[in-house]
C-alpha cells in the first residue's frame, strides 16, 4: 500500500452539519476501499487565493492515508461528482 495526502476545499455556504458530512465523504471512500486513515485534520475556513465557483472562502481539510493505487480513481470520481467539493489534490508521499 502507498501513502497519500489528500487536501480538499468544501463550499463555505453550507451549514456546519453539511460541511462535516461532505468532509467525511472522502474519508469514507478510503475506508470502504480497505484503506487506512492515518490523519484527518480540519484546517478551518480560509480565504482562497482566487475565486472558485464564485466563492472567496472555503473549508480546508487534510487527509493522510494508506491505500492501494486503485483508491485514487474512486476518490477522483466522488470528488468530481460532489458539487460541494470546490477543489482537491491527491499526492503520493514518498517514504
Image: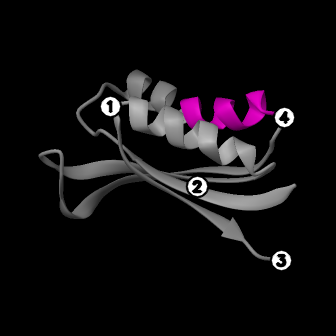
**Percent of width and height locating residue 36:** 83, 44
- Mark with earlier residue (2, 1): 2
Looking at the rendering, the stretch of residues picked out in magenta corresponds to 24-33
Which quadrant is the C terminus positioned in? bottom right
58 within the magenta span: no
Q: Is residue 18 above or below residue 12?
A: above
Which quadrant is the N terminus positioned in? bottom right
Q: Is mark 4 on a helix, strand or loop?
A: loop
Residue at image coords 46%, 38%:
79
Identify the residue position indicated by label 1 in the image: 83
- Mark with earlier residue (1, 3): 1
Horizontal relation, residue 1 to residue 62: left or right: right
**Percent of width and height locating residue 15:** 31, 25
Q: Are marks 3 and 2 in contact (CB under 8 Å)?
A: no
Residue 14 lies in quadrant: top left
Q: Is mark 3 on a helix, strand or loop?
A: loop
Identify the residue position indicated by label 4 in the image: 34
Question: Residue 95 bears which disc, if any?
Answer: 3
Q: How far is mark 1 from mark 3, CA to CA? A: 33 Å
Q: In this view, does 45 lie above or below 3?
A: above
- Mark with earlier residue (3, 4): 4
Amino acid at each position: 500500500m502507498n501513502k497519500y495526502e489528500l487536501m480538499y476545499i468544501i463550499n463555505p455556504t453550507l451549514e456546519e452539519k453539511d460541511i462535516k458530512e461532505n468532509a467525511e465523504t472522502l474519508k469514507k471512500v478510503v475506508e470502504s476501499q480497505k484503506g487506512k486513515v492515518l490523519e484527518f485534520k480540519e484546517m478551518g475556513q480560509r480565504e482562497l487565493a482566487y475565486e472558485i465557483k464564485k466563492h472567496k472562502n472555503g473549508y480546508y481539510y487534510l487527509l493522510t492515508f494508506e491505500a492501494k493505487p486503485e483508491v485514487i480513481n474512486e476518490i477522483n470520481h466522488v470528488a468530481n461528482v460532489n458539487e460541494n467539493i470546490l477543489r482537491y489534490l491527491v499526492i503520493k508521499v514518498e517514504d
